[in-house]
């Protein structure tokens, strides 16, 4: 089976590594063009490109898939199957229809829930108890193709998006291997998605960072976990803005207004929530400083409780 792999970030690189480890016949790798990164804004390879070159695979980096050039390259490669994992570009119909075995995708949710970008982060942000990964046949509509396999996992109560991302990245690679084995055997199922159950997600941005203290302690905790490692939750406390990395629910109740500092000491900074309960900020980062325990920050920067 001749496979063309399309992907860009580390989530995709894990799947590519699995294909390499299992000795699949990868005839070409498509990834996004090099982009500037870091403080120096030096041009950098994607994680997929780096891995592909390390393993002697031919890399293609078209800026568009719609000018005919990428289609010509793919026709020359004669793939039986195209595998797409977090590529970052939508495949036009002429590419979707090219390989005899179709185009398949690994997606970080239990479809049809959370179609679109950042499905892993939104599962945490929304306080879901479980999530998972799905493999599907690509269709012209985003993430709407027939599902092949799904794998479910529980979300830890204090698990961050970054931690969940790493777990689903590995789960996705394993599920891709299972999917390819089934396709090779001619036994891969096709389960149409229930459109009535479809939900969609959006990309994260920094406007989401400020914590809404009118929420419940669990909602606030999930928001803090969901925005890690980027863009990270923030809070204004005593006139200063902090990045917030860890909070804990307390058993205390207060009549203070949401966002008020209830206490500040060895346990951390206790903040009133809209439900009358409180949460404790235990890990934070002040501007220009490193991430630290809130209690350690308070040793040199006491916060007055009104």
Image (cartoon, rainbow, N blue to C red):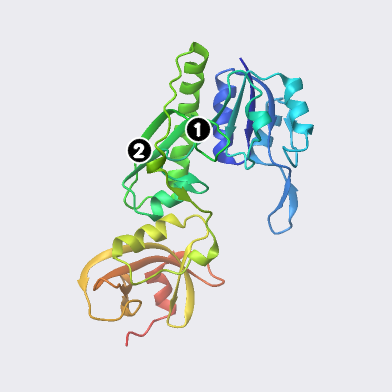
Residue furthest to the top: 185
Which label number is shown at residue 287? none
State the count of labels. Answer: 2
Which label number is shown at residue 153? 2
Q: Nearer the viewer, residue 130 or 247?
A: 130
Compared with 16, 187 (above or below) is above
Per the model, the C-alpha gap separating discs 1 and 2 is 22 Å
Q: Nearer the viewer, residue 294 or 69?
A: 69
Q: Is residue 57 left or right of residue 292?
A: right
Q: Is residue 135 left or right of residue 49?
A: left
Q: Earlier in the sequence, mark 1 or mark 2?
A: 1
Q: Nearer the viewer, mark 1 or mark 2?
A: 1
Q: Nearer the viewer, residue 40 or 202?
A: 202
Q: Secondary structure at mark 1?
A: loop
Residue furthest to the front: 196
| Picture coordinates of residue 183, whole percent (x, y) | 51, 17
Give the residue at x 52% y 60%: 231
Q: Which residue is labeled 1 in the image? A: 145
Using the rendered view, name the quadrant where residue 1 is placed.
Answer: top right
């Amino acid at each position: 089976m001749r496979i063309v792999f399309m992907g860009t970030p580390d989530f995709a690189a894990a799947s590519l590594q699995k294909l390499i480890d299992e000795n699949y016949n990868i005839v070409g790798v498509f990834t996004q063009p090099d982009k500037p990164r870091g403080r120096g804004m030096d041009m950098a390879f994607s994680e997929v490109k780096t891995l592909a070159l390390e393993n002697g695979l031919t890399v293609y980096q078209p800026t568009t898939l719609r000018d005919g050039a990428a289609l010509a390259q793919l026709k020359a490669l004669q793939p039986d199957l195209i595998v797409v994992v977090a590529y970052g570009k939508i495949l036009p119909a002429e590419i979707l229809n090219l390989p005899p075995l179709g185009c398949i995708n690994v997606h970080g949710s239990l479809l049809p829930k959370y179609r679109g970008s950042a499905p892993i982060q939104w599962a945490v942000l929304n306080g879901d108890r479980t999530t998972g990964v799905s493999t599907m046949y690509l269709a012209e509509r985003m993430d709407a193709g027939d599902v092949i396999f799904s794998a479910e996992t529980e979300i830890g109560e204090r698990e961050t998006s970054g931690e969940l991302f790493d777990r689903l990245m590995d789960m996705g690679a394993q599920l891709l291997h299972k999917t390819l084995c089934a396709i090779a055997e001619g036994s891969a199922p096709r389960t149409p998605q229930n459109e009535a159950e479809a939900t969609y997600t959006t990309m994260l941005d920094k406007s989401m960072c400020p914590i809404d203290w009118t929420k419940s302690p669990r909602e606030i905790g999930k928001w803090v976990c969901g925005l890690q490692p980027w863009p990270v939750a923030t809070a204004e406390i005593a006139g200063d803005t902090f990045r917030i990395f860890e909070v804990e629910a307390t058993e205390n109740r207060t009549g203070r207004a949401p966002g008020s500092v209830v206490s500040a000491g060895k346990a951390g900074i206790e903040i009133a929530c809209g439900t009358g309960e409180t949460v404790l900020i235990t890990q934070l980062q002040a501007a220009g400083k490193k991430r630290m325990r809130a209690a350690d920050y308070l040793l040199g920067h006491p916060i007055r409780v009104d």
